[in-house]
Amino acid sequence: MLVLDATVVNVALPTIEAALHLGEARLTWVNNSYLIAFGGLLLLFGRLGDLLGRRRIFLTGVALFSVASGLCGLAAGPGLLVIARFAQGVGAAAASSVVLAIIATEFPGADEPPAP
């Protein structure tokens, strides 16, 4: 869902443009704000997962993504929508940066010993 959300909003852009009376420049920021936050913070949250705990970072990311998704749905203007999309990107970066490490440590291969 986290990666899908980066592109699925493209389907809704004409409806968003009509409902919120957005110009082309602001409409571009609906997508860009998510992608900038997501791409820019992946490495930082990966490192924070190593330092503070992957589970903590994952749950924080999912919670932030969920709250921001609700705010996107309630946004009555372009400002809140762009800010909420940025927050979605931050949450998605946090959750997706550690999820593969969690899976790898929880489900080791047949030739690997279980993690302590």
Image (tube, rainbow, N blue to C red):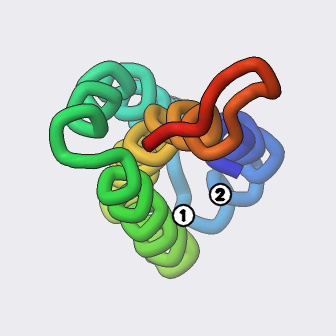
**Kind of residue sitting beneath label 2:** Ile
Residue at image x 42%, y 53%? 58
Q: Is residue 26 visible?
A: no
Residue 92 shown left or right of residue 15 in the figure: left
Count of number-bearing discs: 2
Residue at image x 70%, y 41%? 107
Q: Label 1's element?
A: helix
Residue 25, position as x, y percentages in the image: 45, 30
Residue 73, position as x, y percentages in the image: 57, 74
Q: Label 2's element?
A: helix
Residue 48, position as x, y percentages in the image: 21, 35
Image marks 2 and 1: residues in contact by CB distance under 8 Å: yes
Residue at image x 38%, y 26%? 42
In space, the residues marked 2 and 1 are separated at their CA atoms by 6 Å
From the image, tell me which residue sits under label 1.
20
The quarter holding residue 80 reads bottom left
Residue 9 shown left or right of residue 87 in the figure: right
Q: Is residue 30 above or below residue 81?
A: above
Mark 1 surroundings within 10 Å by alpha-carbon count, few (fewer than 14), some (14 through 19), many (20 or more)? some
Res 105 label: none
From the image, tell me which residue sits under label 2.
16
Judge by depth and name the residue closer to the eye, 104 or 56: 104
